[in-house]
Image (cartoon, rainbow, N blue to C red):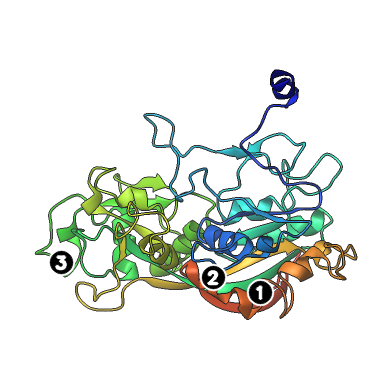
């Protein structure tokens, strides 16, 4: 009898797929854990939205296939693996949106729109606001544009290993010189003539990430408004805020690696969330640069982006409620994103809570079709 019962049980799967009425998000690496904690709770016991076991849940797909936030690379390759996921039950695996740009595109672009036109990704995590091109694309697709909700702040600065050969800080112009190849060893940096003669290994975030977009804009500003060419022959393109790239036990030349890194991620690394492996692997260079001046430091806005058509939807999301899913999760003072009840979840991910409905379109810009 036991054998008959066992034979009748269907095969199991390790993955749980979002169902029709579940809400799915993807995008930025920088805030993937922030949304994880807000929706599913923290290891310290702070509950998340899903902790109350609502009928319809929130699925927040991380940017990488590695739960520690590290990039995944095929054997003997330095090219990031484009991991795939099933974003909705009954659909095929698609590339997991990795970065702000990929998350935003998933709101209006194939292959993330179901065969019936129903979206398989409903919100995008962003470490930058959308562009006019992205907002116009969402309008053209019939979604009324993109609506932006600011909910946290995070600094972007230059990260290194704690035992680095880099100086205490670097100005934006000095950082620019490293990535353009003007300085390939530490002692070539102006004011740092007595520094190490070791070769610098600049780490550049993957294209399409919000961190890369912010860094590119900062380097353009440091270059007098002209887009620079990153010509340093030792540049490596890596997953943004990947602490494994600074780990001397995992990579060679860790003491000479440097790249833009999220301050919030460092706080999370050092909190013990990833175990002892990540703690104290990366520090920010915020000291006085050689020759004086201010160290590179960009205070960034963390956002959630949704389709404007979803903001105005009349469809009630949870049984017994009167609100749609956007108003439940992101829109208004009582939403999950805004309420002080979840401020501790945001802080647990290393970021500072600050909520503002930035509206539809691109805040501070006038987009014309």
* Mark 2: few/some/many CA within 10 Å (<14, 14-19, 20+): many
Quick check: can you spot residue 318?
Answer: yes
Instruction: Write down the quadrant of residue 264 in the picture.
Output: bottom left
Q: Residue at x 70, y 22 (%)?
A: 2
Q: Residues within 10 Å of mark 3 (few under 14, many from 20)?
A: some
Residue 231 makes an appearance in the image: no
Q: Marks 2 and 1, how far apart in space?
A: 23 Å
Q: Quadrant of residue 182?
A: bottom left
Which residue is identified by label 1?
A: 363
The residue located at (44%, 50%) in the rendering is 68
How many numbered discs sit on the rendered protein?
3
In three-dimensional space, the C-alpha distance between marks 1 and 3, rounded to whole angstroms, equals 40 Å
Residue assigned mark 3: 192
Q: Nearer the viewer, mark 3 or mark 2?
A: 2
Of all residues, the one furthest to the front in this rendering is 1
Could you say where residue 125 lies in the image, as x and y percent from the top left? Answer: 61, 60
Occupied quadrant, residue 271: bottom left
- Residue behind mark 2: 346
Residue 356 image offset from top left, x and y in percent: 65, 79
Please provide percent x and percent y for residue 57: 73, 56
Q: Earlier in the sequence, mark 3 or mark 2?
A: 3
Label 1 crowd (10 A; few <14 / some 14-19 / many >=20):
some
Left or right: 226 in relation to 177: right
């Amino acid at each position: 009898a036991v054998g008959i019962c066992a034979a009748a049980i269907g095969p199991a799967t390790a993955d749980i797929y979002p169902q029709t009425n579940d809400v799915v998000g993807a995008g930025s690496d920088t805030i993937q854990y922030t949304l994880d904690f807000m929706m599913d709770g923290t290891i310290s016991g702070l509950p998340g939205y899903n902790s109350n076991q609502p009928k319809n849940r929130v699925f927040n797909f991380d940017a990488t296939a590695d739960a520690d936030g590290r990039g995944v690379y095929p054997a003997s390759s330095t090219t990031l693996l484009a991991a795939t996921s099933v974003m909705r039950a009954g659909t095929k695996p698609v590339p997991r949106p990795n970065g702000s740009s990929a998350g935003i595109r998933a709101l209006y672009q194939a292959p993330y729109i179901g065969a019936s036109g129903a979206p398989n990704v409903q919100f995008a995590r962003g470490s930058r606001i959308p562009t006019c091109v992205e907002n116009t694309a969402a309008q053209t697709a019939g979604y009324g544009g993109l609506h932006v909700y600011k909910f946290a702040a995070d600094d972007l600065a230059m990260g290194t290993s704690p035992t680095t050969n880099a100086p205490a800080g670097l100005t934006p112009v000095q950082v620019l010189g490293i990535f353009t190849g003007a300085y390939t060893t530490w002692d070539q940096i102006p004011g740092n003539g007595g520094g190490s003669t070791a070769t610098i290994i600049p780490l550049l975030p993957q294209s399409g990430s919000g961190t890369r977009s912010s860094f590119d804009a900062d380097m353009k500003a440091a270059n007098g408004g002209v887009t620079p060419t990153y010509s340093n022959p030792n540049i490596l393109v890596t997953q943004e805020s990947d602490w494994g790239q600074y780990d001397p036990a995992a990579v060679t030349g860790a003491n000479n690696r440097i790249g833009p890194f999220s301050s919030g991620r460092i706080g999370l690394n050092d909190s013990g969330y990833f175990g002892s492996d990540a703690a104290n692997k990366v520090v920010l260079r915020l000291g006085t640069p050689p020759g004086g001046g201010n160290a590179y430091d960009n205070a960034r806005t963390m956002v959630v982006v949704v389709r404007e058509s979803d903001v105005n939807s009349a469809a009630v999301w949870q049984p017994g409620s009167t609100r749609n899913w956007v108003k439940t999760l992101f829109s208004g003072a009582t939403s999950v994103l805004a309420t002080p009840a979840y401020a501790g979840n945001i802080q647990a991910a290393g970021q500072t809570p600050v909520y503002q409905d930035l509206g539809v379109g691109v805040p501070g810009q006038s987009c014309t079709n």
